Image: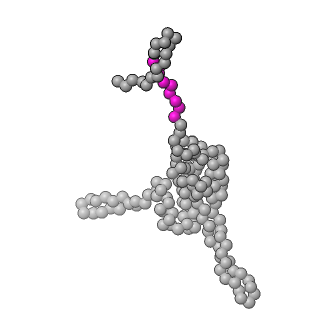
């Protein structure tokens, strides 16, 4: 049995008596969190800014007329947890800690994942995203490319 620590004090008659020590509140350990409502607003701003666009690239210039010829490429700005961490200037692990403690921030990370999966599916089907990269990204969201193989008396049946 463990006894509580006590402090000895004198009563009115001068005799010693024991009184339990008061419990002190523990101070938090480590650096204070940077999480605030402002961080939440910045995260929402990051999601709004993460739209694909076109990048204008100078292809050539006519030496006689000086006329410039441009080509356009897709500028992919897919929202990602890594991009959000860079935008907020925190570590990626910090984002996941905030998501554990704050439900509204957890919703932000879930929204990033939903936008990412939806956009990758649509843009890959349209041929705008590299199919191998799209397959890799969709694997993170639970999509799989697998074949079912059955072996029946030296005969292999593939179901796709």
Is residue 114 something one can see in this rendering?
A: no
Q: Quadrant of the N terminus?
A: top left
**Measured from the top left, where is residue 16 in percent x and y?**
45, 15
**Residue drawn at x 51%, y 25% as measured from the top left:** 22
Residue 33 in the image: above or below residue 84: above
Is 3 contained in the magenta span?
no
Residues in magenta, as a range: 18-26
**Residue drawn at x 65%, y 65% as measured from the top left:** 53
Is residue 158 something one can see in this rendering?
A: yes
Residue sticking out furthest to the front: 14
Left or right, 36 with reference to 146: right
Residue sticking out furthest to the top: 13
Main structural element of the magenta stretch: helix, strand or loop? loop
**Residue drawn at x 48%, y 24% as measured from the top left:** 21
**Residue drawn at x 57%, y 42% as measured from the top left:** 102
Query: Which of the 4 image quarters holds residue 77?
Result: bottom right
Residue sticking out furthest to the bottom: 64
Q: Quadrant of the C terminus?
A: bottom left
Query: Which of the 4 image quarters holds residue 4?
Result: top left
Give the tally of numbered discs. Answer: 0
**Measured from the top left, where is residue 104 in percent x and y?**
59, 43
**Measured from the top left, where is residue 3 in percent x and y?**
39, 23
Q: Nearer the viewer, residue 3 or 72?
A: 3
Q: How is the image coloured?
A: one colour
Residue 79 in the image: above or below residue 74: above
Residue sticking out furthest to the right: 65
Residue 70 in the image: above or below residue 134: below
**Measured from the top left, where is residue 56 in percent x and y?**
67, 72
């Amino acid at each position: 049995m463990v006894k509580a620590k006590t402090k000895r004090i004198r009563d009115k008659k001068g005799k010693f008596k024991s009184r339990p020590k008061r419990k002190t509140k523990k101070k938090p350990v480590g650096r204070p969190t940077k999480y605030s409502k402002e961080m939440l607003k910045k995260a929402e701003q990051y999601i709004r800014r993460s739209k694909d666009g076109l990048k204008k690239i100078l292809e050539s210039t006519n030496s006689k007329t000086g006329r410039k010829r441009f080509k356009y490429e897709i500028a992919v700005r897919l929202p990602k947890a890594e991009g959000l961490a860079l935008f907020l200037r925190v570590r990626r692990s910090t984002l996941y800690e905030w998501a554990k403690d704050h439900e509204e921030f957890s919703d932000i990370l879930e929204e990033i994942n939903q936008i990412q999966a939806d956009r990758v599916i649509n843009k890959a089907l349209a041929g705008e995203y590299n199919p191998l990269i799209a397959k890799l990204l969709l694997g993170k969201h639970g999509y799989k490319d697998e074949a079912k193989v059955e072996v029946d008396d030296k005969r292999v049946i593939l179901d796709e």
